[in-house]
Structures are given as structure tokens and as C-alpha cells.
Image (cartoon, grey):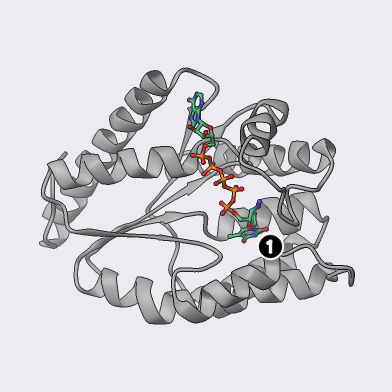
Amino acid sequence: MSGRLITVEGIEGVGKTTNINWICECLAEQGIPFIQSREPGGTALAEEIRQLLLTPRDEKMSDLTELLLVFAARAQHLHQLIEPALLRGEWVVCDRFTDATYAYQGGGRGLDMSLIAALEDLVQDKLRPDLTLILDIEPAVGLARAHQRGAPDRFEQEAISFFTRVRQTYLERAQAAPDRYLIVDAGKPLVDVQAQIRAGLHQFCQRSVSRAQATAEPHHGL
Ligand code: Z5A
């Protein structure tokens, strides 16, 4: 696949939506063909699964049901949207992906990480993001930003300790594979956050160009 998969992660209210728009502006400036998507969701069916996951309800959703729904949505998203785009040579900028599953269902809910890894292999085969930006912030600050938007969804109703575990899992994953992850301090003013992201994208594009030259793939600079 000659496209690139860039994923953006972090706890609620960290600024993913705001900064994904910025990433897309940077790619457009450079004439890099891309699509923008999100998880859970990205196709009509996967968006229906998203509603199931986010809507608060009286019946408690079991942690395993939650995990399987997340991966069901991902299987559909990959098959319908992500893989065809990568095969066409387009870049995919995705608001959350499997790191969110490790962070929320693994770190947050306490599900076994090896179970998540097995589902990751089943659903994605060898596909992994080429670059993952982790927007990092103190949970209290992120939640305060998110709560300004109105009624909390099913995840936003969790206690702060849940988001502390989610954040910790993201950071541990980034530390374990620093080549693939970029940790961005999202507590800074937006202009500083955007500067960190642009610098990270620039480095990533340089690595991408070298790799493409070595394998004669089409490539883009930034
Ligand atoms: N989930 C899961 O459990 N497992 C999985 O595998 C996956 C997902 C894929 C939906 O995610 C839920 O799905 C999610 C985990 C679960 N939990 N929840 N809820 P989502 O990404 O759609 O929902 P979200 O995390 O709630 O996203 P969000 O609230 O839309 O936040 P955001 O996109 O990161 O933030 P934003 O809208 O860009 O910014 C929030 C506000 O802060 C806004 O007013 C901005 O203007 C402001 N902002 C942004 N940056 C700054 C800076 N730097 N300074 C000051 N103010 C700022």
C-alpha cells in the first residue's frame, strides 16, 4: 500500500478535531492526496455502531461487548474506506484508531491487552498506523474543555481515574515504540500545539521520502 495512515489520539477534549483540521491543511498545502475519517465510524454502518457505543442507556454494556463493537466498526471502516484509500496512494488521517482500544478498553476498562492484540491481528492483519500523534493533556483540563460542549456521552460519564489510566496507557505505548509515535503537549496554546505537529509531520515526511526512494514508491514532501 503506498498511502500512509496517520492517527490522532488522546483523551476527551484534548483537541483532536481542532488539530486534525490543521494536519489536513498542512497536507493540502503540500498537494498530498488524503482523506479524513474517524473511529468509531467512518462509514454509514460503522457510524451506526458508534451511536451504540456512545449513547448512554439503562442496560449496562459489558466490557467485552464494547470491545467487540469497536472492532466490528473498525473491520467495516478498514474494508470500505481505509484500505481502498491506501491502495489508491492516498493518506488517511484518522481521529482515533486501535491505540484508543488499548487505552480505553485495555487501560480504562482493564481488559486483557493480549485479547486486544489478538483482535487487532484478526481485523487488521499487518496493517498498523505509520504515524500516531498522541495529544497529551491533564485529564482535568481535557474534560473541562469537553464538558463545555453539552451533555456527556457514555464515555465522558466516566470518573477522572478512568481517564488517568487511559492517558497512562497512551504514554506507555508511545514510550515502547518511539519511532511510530509523536507525543504532543496539548496543554499549550493552540499555536504552540500546531507548531509541534507541523515539525513532527515534517520529520515523518522526510522519513517517508527516504523510505519511498529506497523502495521506488510514490512519495510526497512537506
Ligand atoms: N473509543 C473507545 O473506547 N475505543 C476505541 O477503540 C475508539 C474510541 C476508537 C468517541 O471518541 C469515544 O470512543 C471516545 C473513546 C471511544 N470517548 N469519548 N467520549 P471521539 O474522539 O469522537 O470523542 P472525544 O474524545 O470526546 O472527542 P472530542 O471531545 O470531540 O474532543 P477533541 O476532538 O479531542 O477536542 P476538540 O473538539 O478539538 O477541542 C475541544 C475544545 O477545546 C474546543 O472548544 C477547542 O476549541 C478547545 N481547544 C482545542 N485545543 C485547544 C488548546 N490548545 N487550547 C485551548 N483550547 C483548545
Does residue 118 appear in this view? no
- Mark 1 close to ligand 1, CB under 8 Å: yes
Number of callouts: 1
Residue furthest out toward the right: 59
**In what quadrant does ligand 1 lie?**
top right
Q: Is residue 1 above or below residue 150?
A: below
> Considering the image in quadrants, where does the C terminus appear?
top left
Query: Where is residue 221, by image quadrant?
Result: top left
On the image, the x and y values in percent for residue 206 come to 20, 39
Q: Is residue 129 above or below residue 203?
A: below
Does residue 204 appear in this view? yes
Q: Camera-side residue: 210 or 92? A: 92
Q: Camera-side residue: 190 or 51? A: 51
On the image, the x and y values in percent for residue 162 come to 80, 43
Residue furthest out toward the front: 150
The residue that label 1 is drawn on is 54
The residue drawn where x is 69% and y is 67% is: 53
Q: Residues within 10 Å of mark 1 (few under 14, many from 20)?
A: some
On the image, the x and y values in percent for residue 117 come to 65, 66
The answer to whether 77 appears left or right of 51 in the picture is: left
Query: Where is residue 1, by image quadrant?
Result: bottom left
The residue drawn where x is 22% and y is 64% is: 90
Secondary element under disc 1, as helix, strand or loop, is: helix
Query: Label 1 amino acid?
Result: Leu
Q: Is residue 191 above or below residue 161?
A: above
On the image, the x and y values in percent for residue 92 come to 32, 60
The answer to whether 159 appears left or right of 135 in the picture is: right
The answer to whether 168 appears left or right of 160 in the picture is: left
